[in-house]
Amino acid sequence: MHAFDERMTGMSDKRLVFRIAGVGFALSLEDLVEIREAGAGVLDRSAADPENGLLGLLDYRDEAIHAVNVRQKVGLPAPESFEVAYIVVNGTDGVWAMPVDKVEGIFPVEEFKVYEVPLLLRVNSELPYQTLQVWRSEPLISCEPQTLERFGEAK
Amino acid sequence: MTAKVALLLFAGRNFSLPVEQIRHILQEPELFPLTGLCSGLSGVFMFSDEIIPMVSADILSDLGPYRAGKSCYTIVYQSDYGVVGLPVESSVKIVDESEGSYSDTPPEEETAVVNQFFTYQDFSYPVLDVDKMLTLLSI
């Protein structure tokens, strides 16, 4: 388990790169709370609520937090094998977790360049992200937990 | 400078395109998937420090039977919606506009994305209206 604290010197100017179903995401460490390895017993699936996109509950500092089915929320395919980690993030009303397939690591902000989403992607539908970031010549989705929370909810 | 026309195979069909809107022709750029793409787009690629949406080869399947082919090249095209990538099959032939002629499409052959032909060496190539094609994505 790797825990992050904004008070840690220099950590807030780094970003975590991870992948879900082959799609790359970049998350500011200001939004990252913890990276938890996935494995047997980590997730209490008896508390799952698939209709609401909840996979179950995860222990987090003496409380239980929701693991959210982000794949389903943003239209990515179901995993071919078990996810490797849970990314615990700061949400609007507390922390929550999302399962991911691969964690690439944490990299200095200088390695990322923020881009507007191309017009053609924005005109046809609501997107679960507001910007893209290019990291090592690869466009990544800017992972914004609060945008993900709102995405797909009835207006 | 003489105007040029590109003759190409896109989405399993012969088309022509005015060269003035073509910024570059690439050989199989690396394609990156994203979430939230509509069915007419297959991902994005990097070109000249820009993130460019790639049009799916099956975007015109509504027009009739589609024969899937292997895309060899990507045309980097300046559209009203910004720069887009068009995957094309086999070679792209560039000819002088003066060596052929434009004509209106007969009503029975007009489609949402074609209303002109460019005839070159006795073959009529439909002129692909990329902007109209991309407008269909937003409907």
Image (spheres, rainbow, N blue to C red):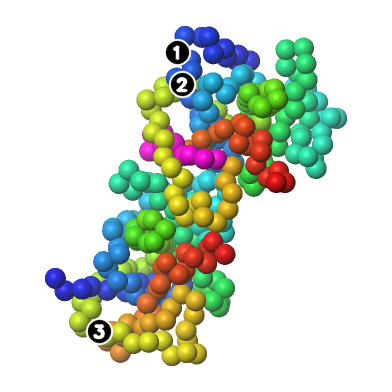
Three-letter amino acid code of the residue under disc 3: Gly
Q: Secondary structure at mark 1?
A: loop
Please tell me the numbered disc located at residue A140.
none
Q: Which residues are magenta?
A: A129-139
Same chain for marks 2 and 3?
A: no
Q: Which residue is labeled 3 in the image?
A: B100
The N terminus of chain A, quarter of image: top right
Q: Secondary structure at mark 2?
A: strand
Chain where mark 1 sits:
A
Look at 50% across and 52% down and name the residue there: A121
| Res. B72 visible in picture | no
- In which image quadrant can residue A97 be found? top right
> In whole angstroms, how far apart are the C-alphas of marks 2 and 3?
57 Å
- In which image quadrant can residue A62 be found? top right
Q: Which residue is labeled 1 in the image?
A: A10
Disc 2 to disc 3: CB gap under 8 Å: no
Viewer-proximal residue, A62 or A30?
A30
Disc 2 to disc 1: CB gap under 8 Å: yes
Please tell me the numbered disc located at residue A14.
2
Residue B66, image x, y percentages: 53, 73
Look at 40% across and 46% down and name the residue there: B51
Three-letter amino acid code of the residue under disc 2: Lys
In the image, residue A109 sits, relative to residue B129, either above or below, namely: above
In the image, residue A74 sits, relative to residue A105, either above or below, namely: below
- In which image quadrant can residue B127 be found? bottom left
Apparent side of residue B53 relative to residue A85 in the rendered image (left or right): left
Q: Secondary structure at mark 3?
A: loop
In this view, the residue farthest toward the left is B1
